[in-house]
Amino acid sequence: MLRDPYPPYRADMAVLFGRCLPLRGIQTDLLAAMDPERPQTPWPAGKSIVRRLPGPRWFAYLCLPLVDLPIFGWARQADFVQARDRIRSGLIGLLAARIFAKPFIYWMSFPIAQGHEVRARELRIEDGKLRKAAAHARAWLAQRAESWVLRQADHLFVQSHAMRDGLVLTGLRPEKMTVVPMGIDLDRFLPAPTPSSDPILSNRRVIAHLGTIGRSRSTGFLLELVQKLRVEFPDVLLLIVGDGLNEDDRHWIRQELIQRDLAKHVHLTGWIAQSEALRWVASASIGLSPIPRGALFDVSSPTKVGEYLALGIPCVANDIPDQRWVLEQSRGGFCVPMQIDAFVAAIRTLLLDPEEARFMGAEGRRWISEHRSYEQLADQVATTYRMVAISDTSVTHR
């Protein structure tokens, strides 16, 4: 029971469930809504029912639970019933699991209810009183439904140690949860991508940011950063491999580059094929991952840090708990507060000491391959499923 549209584009679904777990004897039958803008390919890890939802977006959202109704036909033969990041699906899946005496598992890669609350608070009066009231009502209902689903679940998979620790504070038992952070598909990095040979990179000190950009994602921080760096390093080039998710953010970043006179110091690739994106990033000497602190991002497990390290590139990131853990354990870069001067100091150290930068890159690549590959995470997930299977929680629910 999947929140993301089908076919899944996140590696923790496409790689972990689609490729790695079947090799360990675990098949996943999938219920999901269709993404009409992407080619529909067969699900390689089991059966699938994919439905196209009707009407405008708000109506499709209301109809989303209809996608999950086949669970009542599937649950009898399944070993588990699992919902991922879908609270209403969690309620349906939990009912099916109890009817057929099967363990119910909830996979929480994002705090959905908390996200509703944050969005409700961000609405302004000028957005409309009715809309604001409806958003707060949605958040209130989601929080209570999510809390009940989490407490009734036989096991939880969570995104990070910070997410687990936060849920423990609500009264959930830590032994009921397994932490599965975002991993790396090492097949994409072997052999190592050939760095881009685009002339714009010639004779430049290249620092890179991989992924989505926009005003809400603190991209302004990156622009302020390069404005300060270019004073000491006139040849610095910030390589942004990605783009905004919507037209407003795409227009905004291009206007900012003009207004800040950064056209010679920032290169924006736009959205490009994944293999080509890695070639651009591989041409950089440092990868950047500034992510604003807050209730939602603090429990996240950002992928870009692992991708930089898998490429052998040292990373400078701020102190999101998972980023801090990865960089401390791997020695693959610097973790600093999200402050311009702190980032500048860390970047300066790496630019002026290329030998240290190469050492950090090599250490990061080794650690990622040993601790964050999807092959390694799949072993952990498969072990957890087998432990849940032999436990008695589906019969004597605590």
Image (tube, rainbow, N blue to C red):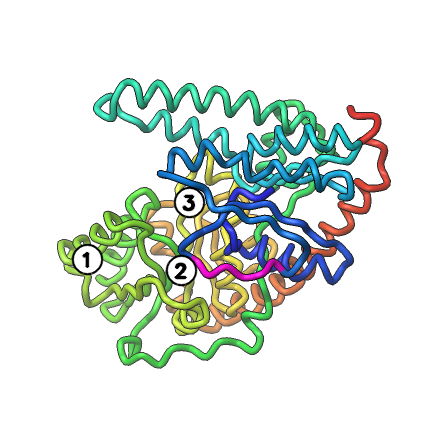
Above or below, 368 against 171 in this view is: below
Q: Which mark, by number, is residue 257? A: 1
Position of 360 with respect to 353 (left or right) is: right
Q: Which mark, by number, is residue 337? A: 3
Q: Position of residue 246 (x, y in %)?
A: 29, 49
In the image, is residue 39 part of the stretch drawn in magenta? Answer: yes
Q: Amino acid at mark 2?
A: Leu
Kindly identify which residue carries mark 2: 210
In the image, is residue 193 part of the stretch drawn in magenta? Answer: no
Q: Earlier in the sequence, mark 2 or mark 1?
A: 2
Residue at left 71%, top 35%? 104
Dot in front, 3 or 2: 2
Q: Amino acid at mark 3?
A: Pro
For the residue labelled by badge 3, is the local secondary structure a helix, a strand or a loop? loop
For the residue labelled by badge 2, is the local secondary structure a helix, a strand or a loop? strand
Task: Pick whichever, 313 or 304, lies toward us.
Answer: 304
Residue 266 position by quadrant:
bottom left
Give the class, few, some or many, for how many residues have Cα within 10 Å of label 1's Cα (few <14, many ≥20).
Answer: some
Please report contact status of discs 3 and 2: CB closer than 8 Å, yes or no.
no
Task: Pick whichever, 111 or 369, lies toward us.
Answer: 111
Q: Position of residue 334 (x, y in %)?
A: 47, 55
Magenta residues, start to end: 38-43
Q: Earlier in the sequence, mark 1 or mark 3?
A: 1
For the residue labelled by badge 1, is the local secondary structure a helix, a strand or a loop? helix
